[in-house]
């Protein structure tokens, strides 16, 4: 155009087209604000995770010498109940006689106990369905159809190895990480 | 939007004229729930429950703010602080019982409001958005009520929190870390109690905001009515004030009589005695159930007992959430152009003999122990619940032959033969 005083670039800009140098600043500014905004979400989300004092309670030492065969005790680990059961030979026999492949969550008794202490079954006392405390650790409580634990909330039956046999729970009672520090002492966590 | 014949706000007092110029809040109220909002003249008492739900929300906020002045959200003192409210705080017992029973009555009113929407198909175009927002309000109210029930830190509070957050652990892979994150620990404790209190205080105000959207969306097409016939002319409507402020006022009086009777004479009838025992993380109550208003959904959760591709637990959780989420699709599942159940003979049969008994059975089974025959009955009822919304409604709406509709709301009220009275609302001669 004869009357134009600008370059082709400025004319394109006047028509609202093309790439401008200012686009860089706009994209950079919005990106920086976006990344900054996302970074703010990190503390907002992670503040809800367990705090240090909650995590600090994550180990429990137990003396198990007083548990007679056939008895169980309840202890507390991370503010949740733990069951420690001293299995009788009949209970171990009962647990070992079940074909592993027939189980919902296939695990043998040996896999759920420590070598040399096959009679000591340590499990969380937290039903894997929705987290109620199953019955069976206390004297005279209902131990369910398979002689282990029974959850009264929604009717899950666990066998003598704490494995799920009947009811809505999807998995065996969880075995926490633990070690024998002596023959009669365990440390959970 | 409103109908062209809606009355226009005309402030007379100088102060009101000044206010109208600077901040037209009175005009806003006048158009929303005053004489400036034309409403169908034939609304029955089923249309009371929206206003009653709004009243219940305000009641909960007022009593809740008062309770928060005396309550301590710390796991070591929460239970005692509730007993302190009951025994030591002046009128504390009254405020707490009003709040606890207020929650129950809020749900009574909400369920009746939803019942109205389902029978008269209030969810159909052009009112889909009102329905969708309403479902959101219902979900928010359920979350708020659940968190509120945890605060007294009794046995049911604790185990309710354990079971409900346990629902999230059913989600594959992320479920268990998610539950730990939600609780801020491995079991409900101080962290969970504090955040539930924070959110329990926040969410009601979020609900107020969403309720405003609900009413805003309502004012675009205007209220539905028992015939389901849209408003055609001015004689089909009356101004909200004084006609429906009066009608809602009567309903509010009846509501208050029943509410006060329960609150003052049977304040614990709707609660569980176990919640007067302080939370004990090592002993689950023998019979653990949620508050009555969650029974139907709890029954659906427990109805799934067999693994089928996915674990039974995940099926239960998915079904429980789907039971409400399927309401979001209702405006498109029910394709009948006729709204009111009064003119839909087949729909009516499935509604009264299918859906309503199913809900009643689920209500009953949700509060019953997890054993036979209740499990099997819940399974049958759950199956029908989903069949009703996903299969029965679409089929019924396409094969049904509806009964003839009145020509207009005025005709439905005054009768067809009154040509002189009806005027432009009369059916045009054939």
Image (cartoon, coloured by chain):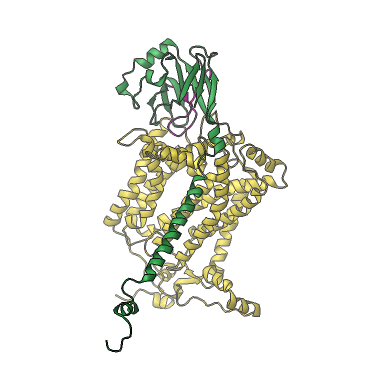
Chain colours: A green, B yellow
Q: Position of residue B118 (x, y in %)?
A: 41, 54
Q: Residue B227: x, y in percent?
A: 40, 63
Q: Nearer the viewer, residue B176 or B378?
A: B176
Q: Residue at x 38, y 65 (%)?
A: B126
Residue at position x 47%, y 71% in the image: B237
The residue nearer to you, when weighing B323 against B113, is B323
Q: Decide whether the magenta segment is chiefly helix, strand or loop.
A: loop
Can you say whether B227 is above or below A60 in the image? below
Looking at the figure, which quarter contains the N terminus of chain B?
A: bottom left
- The C terminus of chain B sits in image quarter: bottom left
Question: Foreground residue, B67 or B241?
Answer: B67
Q: Position of residue B5 (x, y in %)?
A: 47, 77
Compared to residue B406, the image places residue B67 above or below, namely above
Can the viewer see residue B34?
A: no
The residues colored magenta run A123-145
| Residue B76 falls in image quadrant | top right
Residue A129 is inside the magenta segment: yes
Single out the residue that lies furthest toward the top. A89
């Amino acid at each position: 155009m004869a009357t134009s005083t600008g370059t082709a670039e400025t004319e394109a800009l006047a028509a609202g087209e093309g790439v401008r140098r200012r686009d860089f600043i706009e994209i950079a500014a919005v990106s920086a604000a976006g990344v900054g905004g996302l970074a703010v979400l990190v503390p907002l989300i992670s503040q809800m995770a367990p705090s240090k004092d909650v995590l600090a309670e994550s180990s429990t030492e137990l003396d198990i010498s007083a548990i007679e065969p056939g008895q169980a005790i309840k202890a507390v680990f991370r503010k949740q109940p733990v069951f420690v059961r001293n299995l009788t030979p009949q209970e171990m026999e009962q647990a070992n006689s079940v074909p592993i492949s027939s189980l919902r969550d296939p695990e043998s008794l040996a896999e759920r106990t420590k070598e040399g202490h096959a009679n000591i079954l340590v499990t969380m006392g937290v039903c894997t369905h929705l987290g109620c405390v199953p019955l069976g650790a206390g004297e005279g409580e209902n131990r369910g159809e398979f002689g282990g634990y029974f959850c009264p909330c929604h009717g899950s039956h666990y066998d003598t190895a704490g494995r799920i046999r009947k009811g809505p729970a999807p998995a065996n009672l969880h075995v926490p990480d633990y070690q024998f520090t002596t023959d009669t002492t365990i440390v959970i966590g | 939007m409103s109908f062209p014949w809606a009355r226009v706000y005309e402030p007379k007092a100088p102060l009101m004229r000044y206010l109208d110029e600077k901040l037209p809040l009175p005009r806003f109220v006048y158009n929303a729930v005053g004489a400036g909002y034309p409403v169908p003249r034939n609304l029955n008492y089923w249309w009371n429950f929206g206003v009653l739900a709004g009243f219940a929300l305000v009641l909960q906020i007022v009593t809740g703010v008062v309770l928060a002045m005396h309550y301590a959200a710390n796991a070591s003192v929460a239970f005692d602080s509730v007993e302190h409210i009951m025994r030591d705080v002046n009128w504390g017992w009254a405020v707490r019982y009003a709040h606890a029973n207020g929650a129950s009555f809020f749900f009574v009113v909400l369920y009746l409001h939803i019942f109205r929407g389902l029978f008269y198909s209030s969810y159909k175009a052009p009112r889909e958005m009102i329905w969708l927002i309403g479902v959101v309000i219902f979900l928010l109210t359920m979350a708020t009520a659940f968190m509120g029930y945890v605060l007294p830190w009794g046995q049911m509070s604790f185990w309710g929190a354990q079971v409900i957050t346990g629902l999230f652990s059913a989600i594959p892979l992320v479920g268990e870390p998610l539950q730990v994150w939600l609780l801020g620990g491995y079991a409900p404790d101080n962290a969970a109690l504090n955040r539930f209190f924070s959110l329990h205080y926040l969410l009601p105000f979020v609900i107020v905001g969403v309720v405003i959207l609900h009413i805003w969306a309502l004012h675009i097409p205007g209220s539905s009515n028992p015939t389901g016939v849209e408003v055609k002319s001015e004689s089909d409507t009356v101004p909200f004030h004084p006609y429906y402020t009066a009608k809602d006022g009567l309903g509010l009086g009846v509501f208050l009589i029943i509410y006060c009777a329960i609150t003052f004479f049977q304040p614990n009838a709707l609660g569980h005695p176990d919640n007067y025992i302080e939370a004990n993380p090592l002993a689950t109550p023998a019979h653990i159930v949620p508050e009555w208003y969650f029974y139907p959904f709890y029954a659906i959760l427990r109805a799934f007992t067999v693994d089928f591709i996915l674990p039974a637990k995940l099926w239960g959780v998915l079904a429980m959430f789907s039971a409400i989420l399927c309401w979001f699709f209702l405006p498109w599942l029910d394709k009948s152009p006729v709204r009111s159940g009064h003119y839909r003979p087949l729909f009516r049969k499935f509604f009264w003999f299918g859906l309503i008994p199913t809900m009643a059975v689920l209500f009953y089974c949700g509060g019953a122990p997890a054993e036979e025959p209740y499990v099997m009955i819940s399974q049958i009822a759950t199956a029908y619940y989903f069949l009703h919304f996903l299969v029965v409604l679409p089929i019924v709406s396409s094969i049904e032959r509806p009964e003839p509709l009145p020509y207009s709301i005025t005709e439905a009220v005054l009768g067809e033969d009154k040509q002189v009275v009806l005027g432009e609302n009369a059916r045009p001669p054939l």
